[in-house]
Image: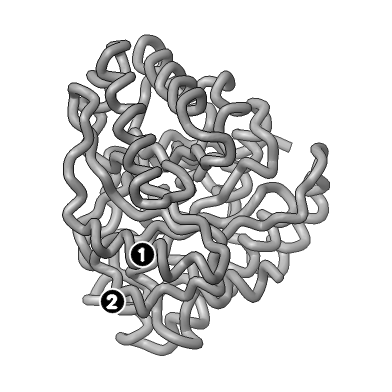
Amino acid sequence: MERACWPIAEQHVDYGEGAIVQTRHANLFRRTARISSLLLTCALLLTGCTPTQPRSTTFRLVAYVTHSLPLASIEFSHLTHVNFAFMKPNADGSIRPLGAIGKLDRIVAAAKPYGVKVLIAVGGWGWDDEFEALAESTDSRARFVQEIAAFIARHKLDGVDLDWEYPNLGASGEAFTALVRDLRAALPTGTLLTAAVLADASNAGGVSEEIFPLVDYLNLMAYDGPASDHSSLSMARSSLDSWVARGLSRDKAILGVPFYSRPGGVSYRRLLQSDAAAARGDRIVYGGVEQNYNGPATMRLKVALTKELGGGIMVWELLHDAPGDDALLKVIWEAAQ
């Protein structure tokens, strides 16, 4: 069966609640028809969802958390990993002071009783030039690795998540591979090393298969497709399939899901506050514009898909979730049990 492929460029941007993730470009890809949730579920069983690789019983539930999110709003019992975003790199390999250092330390302390791993996410949208410069030089790369390792040790973190958006095929990709290799060699055994990558592996030529055995997992940013359906179930499946086809272990393929809409970038919390019907579908009119998002039913289907084809779910970002029993995180966690 032919798989859908689409060139997209997702972006992780920390601007607080209002602005979530900007899209550099999102080429429309053709769809054959809109399929109901029931038919999609059947399709998962009929079109090759049986795993071809050994599976782990571990289901990772990873959430990006920014400094704007109150500590009390983090439901650690529903998570396995937290990526605190973002630390910024300099071109010389140094890292910029983290303004919310106290918040990070409190998250680490609060996560520990639940066994939740806390990583520092480095980069985000708009820091490609700095990554390019630091990674191409042996000296600046060594400085970056040294400072990251020291930061992890100083703040009792469990690892680092590289959010370089995006290494390109050629010298850029080779520098990214060298950076990952150097980090893995320098970090103590057991320290997590992960990266956020494009949804479609065929468009991520700068991410070499050489890093697959070096990383603990990859976060697949399977969102910001066409605004009319920016994070569909078929997109999720194609994303997982594309990375596994390149040789990534299914256990290392973590499917990214959005807690916001397109085209407006409206948080799920605000959508639900505006109309309770938001919990019953994936589309709602907000501010006079139809918004597309992932509601509870689609989140459950994505968890079912990922339990077969991947290693877990990644959330961008927790700030945009609804509170309490209405939380999408709660839906995902319950479906993963």
Mark 2 vs mark 1, CA separation in Å: 10 Å
Structural crowding at the residue carrying mark 2, measured as other residues with C-alpha within 10 Å and reported as few (<14), some (14–19) or many (≥20) = some
**In the structure shown, which secondary structural element does the residue marked by tag 2 occupy?**
strand
Q: Say whether marks 2 and 1 touch (CB < 8 Å).
A: yes
Residue 172 percent across, percent down from the top left: 35, 16
309 lies left or right of 164: right
Q: Residue at x 64, y 32 (%)?
A: 248
Q: Residue at x 66, y 54 (%)?
A: 306
Residue 64 percent across, percent down from the top left: 40, 57
User: Is residue 298 in view?
Assistant: no
Q: Which residue is mark 2?
A: 286
Query: Which amino acid type is shown beneath numbered disc 2?
Result: Tyr
103 lies left or right of 173: left
Q: Is residue 28 above or below residue 105?
A: above
* Number of numbered markers: 2
Q: What mark, if any, has residue 309 been given in the picture?
A: none
Q: Residue at x 33, y 28 (%)?
A: 146
**In the structure shown, which secondary structural element does the residue marked by tag 1 occupy?**
loop
Query: Which amino acid type is shown beneath numbered disc 1?
Result: Ser
Along the line of sight, which residue is nearer the eye, 41 or 56? 56
Give the image quarter of residue 262: bottom left
61 lies left or right of 106: right
Can you tell which of label 2 and label 1 is closer to the viewer?
1
Give the image quarter of residue 293: bottom left
Q: Is residue 103 above or below residue 178?
A: below
User: Is residue 80 in view?
Assistant: yes
305 lies left or right of 9: right
Q: Is residue 151 above or below residue 229?
A: above
Residue 155 percent across, percent down from the top left: 35, 51
Q: Which residue is mark 1?
A: 261
Q: Which comes sooner in the sequence, label 2 or label 1?
A: 1
Image quadrant in which the N terminus is located: top right
